Amino acid sequence: MTPEHVAVIDVGKTNVKLALVDTYDLSEMAVVTRPNTVLEGPPYPHFDVETIWILLLDTLARFHEQHRVDAISITTHGASAALLATDGNLTAPILDYEHTGPELMANDYDALRPAFEETGSPRLPMGLNLGAQLHWQFAQDKSLCERTAAIVTYPQYWVHRLTGVLACDVSSLGCHTDLWNPFEARFSSLADHLGISDKIAPARKSTDVIGTLLPDVTARTGLNPDTQVVCGIHDSNASLFPHVMRRDPPFSVVSTGTWVIVMTVGGPQTPLDPSRDVLVNVNGLGEPVPSARFMGGREYEVVQAGQAAIYDSGVMSTVADNGPLLMPAVVPESGPFQGYAHHWIGPVPNRGSAERSAALSFYLAMMTAECLSLTGHKGTIIVEGPFATNAGYCTMLSAATACTVEIAASVTGTSQGAAMLASQTGKLTKSPNAKRINPDDCSEYETYARNWREALRDCESNKSKNQSSLK
């Protein structure tokens, strides 16, 4: 029987969100959001899973009392895993992937990790390669690997707490972990090199029903003991999943949040450059998807510094005609322009000004357009998440790509996709009422996009000259 109401647990890097989704039309009946905090240690920065767990149980109980919960689906950020002891408890805290500790052993890890051709996973800084996290953690605590009975990817940590069942999902394994071969749908050679082949939990499709609730969970929440919990999915792939199920390729989905992640389905085959944060993701069905990304949400926070301002179409037109231009990269550790120093061309707009907000939105759109070109995009662009409500971003994206931009109906784009794992039903995606921005209506912004790209070529030339002078 198809569940009518699916509770979606969405643990993002910035926020923890819970949404109760009606599977008939995939509308969100209720939403609760809280900041996702990182504990500084010891032994290292890690996620506050116990606070999240209390929030999940309290909210599930409230959702069930007010509306009824028929099934549960989980989606989380990538680059995280839980190390579990034989009793199911953590043998070590879940490492924050932005911790720089793994970089201290970068050379040793690089000697172990498989080539991009095997994993589709680029070498990333900090702990963004899950394999690098595990390698570093085992080196810091010599007994940790031996004490670890099972390793599960992050969505399945919450699945395990709800059901007691051990699993990994293919989309989380395929999220630049170095541990998965997306072309052959199996673990990579790194699992053997790290000595965890017998510890890492079985890979399951995101749509698999993993089990039902443990007795202590049902006692705490009031949910039915037979409530099914599906395997779960990496959050960007949750945004992609409804479109994979319901659209004809080619198209691209842009999932926005802390990370802006571009995922291209059915585009022309394009050589992928791992040095530009281009990678192969794995969708909820286990299929490889060319992808590119940058920390757009984080860049937004850095530039705005808590002083975001509302702007209108008049401000957009003024900035499009007169500038300024913000050039990459605000967060230079990742994305297509790693190592670039961001700067303004033209007068620097004041913090808290409408002009600064508009110029920043244009910058984020141009960065996204660059990511789309790197993945071989063709067709409609669907924008999911917070940036879907940003008019300057969506307008400039259409102008810069000469493609139609479709605005997702839900600002929490992951919720619908995660809910579909449990139901694969609902009226969604090709609604005639969906808001679309066509490039023919954005001609006044084309000059700005062209000027930004010309300025970018100057940045690239200067960077090359600087690198040559250092040799």
Image: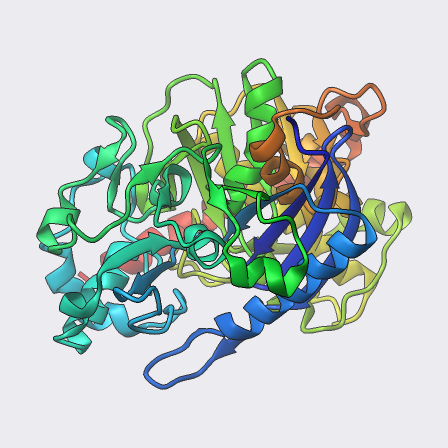
Q: Is residue 173 left or right of residue 349?
A: left
Of all residues, the one furthest to the top in this rendering is: 248
Q: Quadrant of residue 72?
A: top right
User: Does any portion of residue 137 appear in the rendered image?
Assistant: yes
Q: Is residue 142 left or right of residue 379?
A: left
Residue 30 location in percent, x, y? 79, 51
- Name the residue rendered at 45%, 32% in the picture: 283
Q: Is 11 rendered above or below residue 103?
A: above
Location of the N terminus by quadrant is top right
Residue 367 location in percent, x, y? 55, 45
- Name the residue rendered at 59%, 40% in the picture: 418
Residue 375 location in percent, x, y? 44, 30
Q: Quadrant of residue 241?
A: top right
Give whichever of 452, 232 is nearer the camera. Answer: 232
- Name the residue rendered at 54%, 17% in the picture: 250
Q: Is 55 rendered above or below residue 22?
A: below
Residue 468 location in percent, x, y? 24, 56
Q: Is 72 rendered above or below residue 355?
A: above
Give whichever of 156, 132 is nearer the camera. Answer: 156
Q: Quadrant of residue 282?
A: top left
Location of the C terminus by quadrant is bottom left
The figure's colour scheme reads: rainbow
